[in-house]
Amino acid sequence: MGVPAAATIASMTVVPRLPRRVRAALLTVHVAASVGWLGLDGALITLEVTGLRSDVPGIRAGIATAMAALVCRVLMPVVLISLTSGLTLTLGTSWGLVRHWWLLAKSGIAVVLSATGLMLLLPRLHQVLAGGSESVQTQTLAARSAAVVLLLTATGLSVVKPWGKTRLARR
């Protein structure tokens, strides 16, 4: 596909332009879900650190159960809401999905975190629940800590909006 064709595709809207009130409501949902994602990962880090420091099996089991409930019943829906609302906002507003570098970076962060969570962290949850080895818990703690840093980076990108438009948007 040539650059003119790609520029045409970049300027097309898959979703009709959102009315102002709908956009405002959807932006509110997106910000709330994204902040929730960040807060939940922070809470999970706190639980993991507490579990790693405890020598009491009952406390570790309780923490693992709480983590499983948070991940499966709260974090996964919040991530899905954040991704869906963000995608709808990029497609239904003038920002566009591939028109700004900061949006591409933020979308990449969200996709990497979601894929990593589904493919690496979620399958290890049963090991954490079963009181798995400290190395597994330390690895998930490190991954979740990296996720918090990436989520903070995505938040900063949303506020600062650096780097300008992509080549496709300038054409």
Image: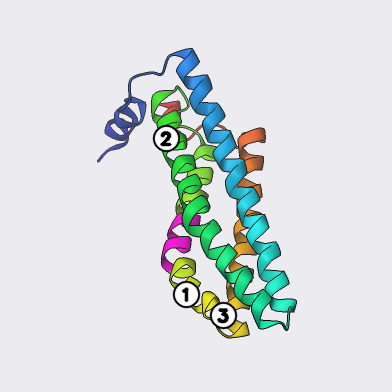
Image-quadrant location for residue 141: bottom right
Is 146 rendered above or below residue 96?
Answer: below
The residue that label 2 is drawn on is 97
The residue that label 3 is drawn on is 136
Say whether residue 89 is magenta: no
Residue furthest to the front: 58
Q: Which residues are magenta?
A: 112-119
Upstream in the sequence, badge 3 or badge 1?
1
Is 87 rendered above or below residue 64?
Answer: above
Amino acid at pointer 3:
Val
Estimate the spatial distance between the alpha carbons at disc 3 and disc 2, rounded to whole Å. Answer: 36 Å
The answer to whether residue 22 is left or right of residue 163 is: left
Crowding near the residue tagged with mark 2, few <14, some 14–19, many ≥20 C-alpha atoms within 10 Å: many
Estimate the spatial distance between the alpha carbons at disc 3 and disc 1, rounded to whole Å. Answer: 11 Å
Rendered location of residue 150, percent (x, y): 61, 54
User: Badges 1 and 2: C-beta atoms under 8 Å apart?
Assistant: no
Rendered location of residue 148, percent (x, y): 64, 56
Estimate the spatial distance between the alpha carbons at disc 1 and disc 2, rounded to whole Å. Answer: 36 Å
Magenta stretch mostly in which secondary structure?
A: helix
Rendered location of residue 171, percent (x, y): 40, 26
Discs 3/2, front: 3
Is 19 rendered above or below residue 77?
Answer: above
Q: Secondary structure at mark 2?
A: loop
State which quarter of the image contains the N terminus.
top left
How many numbered marks have been drawn onto this rendered protein structure? 3
State the residue at coordinates (41%, 39%): 84
Q: Which label is found at residue 110?
A: none
Amino acid at pointer 1:
His
User: Badges 3 and 2: C-beta atoms under 8 Å apart?
Assistant: no
